Image (tube, rainbow, N blue to C red):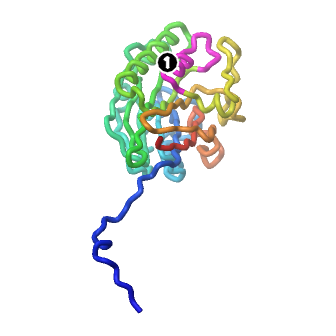
């Protein structure tokens, strides 16, 4: 016995179903890539070797989106062991580049590198064109998320605080023009804590309509109080309860609902073979669920 398939059915196009939900892992990591003669960052070992090791570990972990800061003079070594299909080109080493780069499993459009309008000479912040990057990433068909990578002014004097506050206003203005109503993830080195007397993180969150997964997941919605003593992390971080300056913020928008599912200081995933650190910063890992709405 055999069956005959009607010709009309054979002529119908194959049906495809667009993905309507999924997961997205993001990592922010200040990789301490300043030239060793300028700052060894109190990190043992050779910086070129350490950069290659960071690249190897990133390739093995295959996080969906990785924002790098201080990816300066050892950029080629770091990229030499990476296998990510999408990666930004370096903007240069010190003093020409910002040190901001992104590698990802997904494509993006509209990459912009924006220099802070204001910096403070303290901590050498004006020696490189610090700022932020913007890109619109497509994580699935019809699912776009605006990604921002930033490295804020460092230091603790009044000039530093003023520069950070100005940077927050600058990125908020940019978001208003380029990301209005859209899903956004901002992750990078804020050089700020909620406990800082002149902190500007809260302004970025409230004015940008953003959430902090560390506050929501780890601190159960309760932010540390401005002006109190910081519960600063060691490196590697001993627990999730302590606070660092490297942060991840996000919001939903434009038909894309983002939900932060897990938060982690991924420090112990990035150690040398002898257990020493690879950077003076703890990397931050957040796993999101996304859904088209």
287 sits to left or right of 33: right
Q: Which of these two is toward me, 18 or 248?
A: 18
Q: Is residue 23 magenta?
A: no
Q: Is residue 199 magenta?
A: yes
**Residues in magenta, as a range:** 193-210
Residue lying at the far bottom in this picture: please name it.
1
Q: Which residue is at a point 49% across and 9% down the rendered structure image?
A: 162
Which corner quadrant holds the N terminus? bottom left
- Is residue 225 shown to the viewer in this render? yes
Q: Position of residue 42 (x, y in %)?
A: 59, 31
- Residue at 31% over, 35% down: 110
Label total for image: 1
Q: SS for tag 1? A: helix
**Residue indicated by mark 1:** 207
Quarter of the image for residue 288 reads top right
Is residue 35 something that shows in the picture?
A: no
290 in relation to 131, above or below? below
Q: Position of residue 171 (x, y in %)?
A: 42, 21
Who's the residue at 53% across and 19% down the image? 206
């Amino acid at each position: 016995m055999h069956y005959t398939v009607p010709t009309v059915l054979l002529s119908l196009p194959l049906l495809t179903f667009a993905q309507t939900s999924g997961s997205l892992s993001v990592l922010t990591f200040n990789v301490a890539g300043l030239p060793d003669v300028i700052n060894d960052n109190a990190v043992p070992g050779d910086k070129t070797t350490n950069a290659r090791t960071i690249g190897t570990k990133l390739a093995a972990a295959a996080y969906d989106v990785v924002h790098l800061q201080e990816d300066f003079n050892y950029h080629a070594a770091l990229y030499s062991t990476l296998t990510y299909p999408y990666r930004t080109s370096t903007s240069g080493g010190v003093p020409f580049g910002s040190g901001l780069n992104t590698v990802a499993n997904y494509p993006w459009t509209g990459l912009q590198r924006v220099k802070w309008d204001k910096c403070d000479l303290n901590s050498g912040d004006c020696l490189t064109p610090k700022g932020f990057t913007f890109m619109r990433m497509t994580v699935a068909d019809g699912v776009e998320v605006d990604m921002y990578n930033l490295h804020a002014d460092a230091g603790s004097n009044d000039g530093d605080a003023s520069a950070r506050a100005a940077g927050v206003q600058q990125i908020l203005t940019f978001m208003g023009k380029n990301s209005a109503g859209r899903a956004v993830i901002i992750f990078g080195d804020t050089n700020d804590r909620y406990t800082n007397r002149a902190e500007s993180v809260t302004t970025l969150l409230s004015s940008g309509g953003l959430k902090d997964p560390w506050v929501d997941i780890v601190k159960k919605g309760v932010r540390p109080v401005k002006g109190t003593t910081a519960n600063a992390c060691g490196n590697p971080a001993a627990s999730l309860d302590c606070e660092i300056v490297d942060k991840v913020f996000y919001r939903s928008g434009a038909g894309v609902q983002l939900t932060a599912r897990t938060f982690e200081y991924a420090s112990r995933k990035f150690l040398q073979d002898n257990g020493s650190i690879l950077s003076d910063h703890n990397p931050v890992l957040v796993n999101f669920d996304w859904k088209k709405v």
